[in-house]
Amino acid sequence: MASSRNARLAGLDLGDEFASLFSGTGFGDAQFAVAAASSKDTVATASVAVSDDTMAPGEAGAAAALTPQPGIGTYNGQVGSAANAYLISAARQAYVAKPSALYNLGSMFSVSSVGATAPAYISVSLYDRDAYAGKESYNYGTLTATNGATYKAGGFTLNFALVNGQYVTANGETLSDFTFAASTQENRVENFSMYAYDAKGTVLTSRNVEVVTHATTVDKTPGLATAAEIASVAQSMIGQVWDASGCWNLACDISATAGAALPINSGWISAAAATSNGQWNVAYDAYNGVKANWASTLQAGDIVELGWTGANYGHIFTIDRVVNGTAYLVDNSGAYLNKAGGDPTDLYVVERKITDYTPYINQSTVVVFRDSGTASSAANIAPTTLFTPITDLGVGKSVALSTLFRSTDADNDAITQYMVRDDGSNGGYISLNGAKQAVGQWTTITAAQLSQLTYTASSSGSSSEAIEVKAFDGKTWGVADTGRIVSLYDQTNQNDEKTFRNFGAVDKASYATKATEWVGSTDKYDWFTFSVAGPSASVDVQLSNMTGQVDLWVYNTNTGALVGSAYGYQYNNLACKLTGTLSTGSYTIRIDDYLGDTNYDLTVGKTGTLPTVASGGTTQAIYSGEALKPTQGAVGDSTNYFAGVSPLAGTAPSLALADSTGLGSGSANVSVVQPPANQNDRLLLAQA
C-alpha cells in the first residue's frame, strides 16, 4: 500500500490518517516513483501491448505495500494445519457476480460440527475492495441478517460459537441467516475469509472465497480455474485504468474472475503468505530457500508475490505468457493518466517482461502461486433468496409480494419457479390472482405468475407474520428465506394509543401473550396494561425483534410506583427481559423510543410460559431496586443512569412524573378494566 486510502486492503478504510505511508522517488527508497511512463514507447506483440525496454530507477512501477500495518483490519498470520483442512468446505472458491447478485453464507461454507475435532468457534471476515481507480465510491456489497441488521463497510468480522451442534452468533444466528448482495461496481472484490478455532483460540484451518462483480463477464467454468483461463483474464485487463496501489486487488480480480480465490495471506510480504487455498498451491517459496533460477520455471497463469530490495513493501502480478523462456506479466505499472481533475494515482494496466523487475527484487521474499486446475466441486449452486427482513404495513393493506424479495442464481441459471408460505396465524394472508392461499402450506408458482402474488396485512394491528420464499433454477430448490411483515395501526400523533391493549390477568393464563408494535419519530411511546389476580405471581416481561433502541418501563397502575425498567438493544433476538414477583393489582407498561424507528414484540406472561428466544446480549436495567429485575447482565446506576440523556433523568420516575413529561400522557388516568381471566377478548393481541 502506498497510501492509506488503500489501507482497506485488510478490511478498513482508514481515511487520510495513514496517507503517504511511503515517500521518496528513489527505487531503493520507500516506493517506485511512478513518473514518466507515458513517454515510453510500446510495441504490439501477439496483439498484446508490451513495454519494449527495461525499468530503470525512478520509472513507472507498482507502489503496493503489502506488509501489514498496525491497526489495519484483522489480519491473521495463522492459517492452520493442512491436516485440518477438512473442517471447512467451500461450495466454490470464487464467484463472478452480476451487480447485486445474492450469496448465502450457509451455502458458501460448511463446517464440521460433529465429534471431538469440531471447531469450538469460527469467524468470517469480509474485506471489500474496489479497483482503486478514481476516488473511492464506497459502493460496498451488503450483508443482511434475518433479524434486519445490515453490514456495509470496508471490513468486518462475524463470530460464531458451537452451541448444540450448530454454529451461532451471540444473537442465535447461523451462517444461513446471513445473505450477501454483491456491489454494483465493476471490478469490486469481496473477500470472505473463514477461520476455525479450537477452545483455546488456536487457528485450526482457514478458507478464502472471493466474489468479484462483473456486469457482463461470465465464468464459463464456474468453480474451476485453469492456467489458460487465468492468463486470458489477465490479458483482458490490459489497458484498464487502475490505481498505483492496487496490485493485490488486480491479482485477486484476475484470480476470482477465472474461478479461484487467492489465499488471504497473499496480501502481505511475509513467510505467512506462502500458503495454499483451494486450487491455489505454492509452486515456489523463497522463505524455504532461494533458488536462482525460479523465474525460468514460471508458467502462464502463475501469480507472483515479492518484496523490493531495500524497501518494506512489494508487489504482486500475474504471468500471462512465457515466450522463449521469458515470462511476461500483467500489472498496474503503466503510464499515468494525468487527467485534469482525475485521481493523480490513476494509471494503466500493462504487460511487461519480468526481466524489467529482476534487478530490484528481494530474492528471499518471492512466492509463486500456481493453480492446480482441479476443484473439489463444480456442482450446480442452488438459487439464493433475500426477503426484506422487516416490512411494516398498515392494517388491512396489501402489497405485491414480489416487491419484498428477490432471488438470483450463482450459475446464472434462470429462476423458473417459486414456493411461498405464510407461517402466521394472525389474520394476514397470501393471494394468488385474487385467490386466498392456505396458511401454513407451500404454494408453488411459475416465474410468470410471480406478479399475481400479493400479501394482505391482518385487519387487526399489533401483530406480525413470517413469510417464507424459495426459488428453483430448473435443477435445485434453494434454501427458503424468511421475512417478517408487521400489521400496524396509525403510527402518527399517538393515534394507535386509542386502541385498548390489555394483556389481561397474566397469572391465570396458561400461555404468554404477545403484542407487536412500533415506536419512533412519529409515535414516541406505546402503553399497555396487565393485571395479577393474585395473591401474587412471578411474571416475565420481554422485548424482542427490535431494529432500534427503546426503554421499557413497568409501573403499578394504582400507586404510580416504578416496579421495573430496562434498556432494549437493537438487532438482538432477545434484547430486554424483566422477571420478578408482583402482588395483586394492575400494571402499566410503557415503551419509549430511545434511538431510531423500530417495531418490536412485547411478550408478557407468568414465568415459564414465554417462548425460548436465543439471547443476543445482556439486559441492562435503568434503575435498580425494583420488583422486576433483568434476568441477566448488569444493573444500571440506581440514581442517575440516564442523566443528561433521557427526559426521565434523576430519581426513578413514577407514572405521574412520566405523564408530566408528555411521554406517557394519559396512561395513568385511564380507567383500567379488569379483564376476564381467559383473555379471549383481547382481539388486538396474539398468543406468543
Image (cartoon, helix red, strand yellow):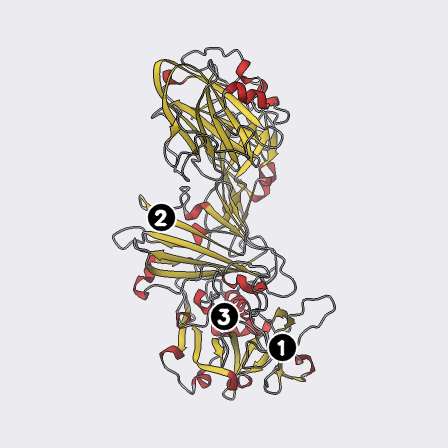
Dot 1 crowding, Cα within 10 Å, few <14, some 14–19, many 20+: many
* Mark 3 neighbour density, 10 Å: few (under 14) some (14–19) many (20 or more): many
- Please provide percent x and percent y for residue 389: 52, 40
For the residues bearing labels 1 and 2, Cβ distance under 8 angstroms: no
Q: Nearer the viewer, residue 186 or 607?
A: 607
Q: CA distance from mark 1 to mark 2?
A: 47 Å
Residue at (51, 65) in percent of width and height = 256
Q: Spot the residue most to the left.
A: 116
Residue 512: numbered disc: none
- Disc 2 element: strand
| Dot 3 or dot 2, earlier in sequence | 3
Quarter the C terminus occupies? top left
Provide residue 440's location: percent of width, then percent of height: 45, 31
Report which residue position mark 3 lands on. Answer: 66
Q: Amino acid at mark 2?
A: Ala
Which amino acid does the dot numbered 3 rest on? Leu
Residue 657 vertical position relative to residue 147 in the rendered view, above or below: above
- Mark yes or no: residue 656 visible: yes
Residue beneath the point at 36% across and 78% down: 288
Task: Give the residue at mark 1.
Answer: 34
- x and y percentages locating residue 210 in the rendered image: 49, 61
The numbered mark at residue 161 is 2
Q: Is residue 517 above or below residue 509?
A: below
Q: CA distance from mark 3 to mark 1?
A: 17 Å
Label 3 vs label 2, nearer the camera: 3
Q: Circle 1 sits in a helix, a strand or a loop, which is it?
A: loop
Viewer-nearest residue: 379 or 422: 422
Indicate which disc, 1 or 2, sits on the residue closer to the N terminus. 1
At 57% from the left and 55% from the top, the residue drawn is: 140
